[in-house]
Image: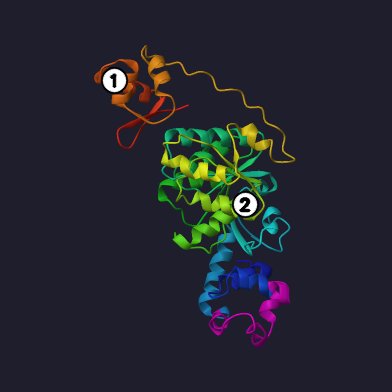
Amino acid sequence: MKIDAGLASWFRLTLTPGIGPASVRKLLRQFGLPERILAAKRSELARYVTADALSALDSAEVGRAVEEALRWAEAPGHFALTLADERYPKLLLEIADPPPLLYCRGRPELLDRPAIAIVGSRNASAAGTQNAESFARAFSGVGIAIVSGLALGIDTAAHRGGLAGAGSTIAVLGTGIDRCYPTRNADLAREIAAQGLLISEFPLGTRAIAANFPRRNQLISGLSRGCLVVEAALASGSLITARAALEQGREVFAIPGSIHSPLAKGCHALIKAGAKLVETADDVLAELPGLAKLEVPPPRPVVSATSEAPPLLAQMGFDPVDVDTLCRRVGMRAEEVSSTLLQLELEGLVCTLPGGLFQRVK
């Protein structure tokens, strides 16, 4: 294996237990590049890191981790970016705590494109996933990369929409780049590695640990010009991403929903706090300087092949509703309403919600 001494030094510094990103940046400011840091007297380094970290810095265990990382970086499509690399994302250099090293797999040119983050609930509604994919597809269609976190629900839909266009998608992981979380998205991760870009700041082998995901969320917003929250409950992790975006000086957008839906509460809270309410992709792009305005055609009216569908859909509105309420609204028997709802669900016009509720899908 041909050893890149400069990259090996970056790996050794960032893979040493007890030397976190903040300590790495402090050492870089004091000594310069990692090769100079490693060449410094250990007594000088002791002013900035603990004795345990200094002991680990020269350990065989860290040496083995460095060799593994170097082997990983030699594989096709794999590369590592450091703060000293000219390809390091410029937007990340603007945030308060940019990761010293990024593990990447896929297409590096995506980092040069303008990007928009799309995040939201893991337990998304059918309407929410449809909105996420539709917005992502519209942005990607004009060359904007979609950034999200590979989670189920809104993230998954956003990545799929991004893959459908020229802008493609960037998935930021809360694990090592050699792991996939959740495992249900393993096929999606492989597709993104081939057509988009996977990024992680965590060492190889890092498992899914709750404490790592806020860092991932800061990276999602840091890579993006703006952050769109599609659906979010009040306790949603996507609100962490939105707060990080605000702290980083990014624009925050939110799609409103039904006042009765728990998945709309987080978006409504963001809007009350000053996030921009959006209904179309053009609403987002109009707020981001330097991006061409995107004209999105109005949605076509939904016409079902079921004869009872148009009046039932009209009476449903877009709020969740139960069968008994629909019976009263349209003057139909429960069996007729249930049969029609089943047909509409098969056609993708209605989705089933917990608690025996139904909701119209745009």
- In the figure, is residue 20 to the left or right of 313? right
Q: Secondary structure at mark 2?
A: helix
Q: Position of residue 29 (x, y in %)?
A: 72, 72
In front of the other: 313 or 29 = 313
| Mark 1 residue type | Ser
Mark 2 sits on what residue? 246
Quadrant of the image containing the N terminus:
bottom right
- In the figure, is residue 31 to the left or right of 310? right
Report crowding for label 2: few under 14, some 14 to 19, many 20 or more residues within 10 A (C-alpha). Answer: some
Q: Residues under labels 1 and 2: Cα distance? A: 47 Å
Q: Residue at horizontal 60%, vertical 31%?
A: 280
Q: Secondary structure at mark 1?
A: helix
Q: Position of residue 5 (x, y in %)?
A: 67, 70
**Stretch in magenta:** 28-56
Chief SS of the magenta region: helix
Q: Position of residue 114 (x, y in %)?
A: 68, 44
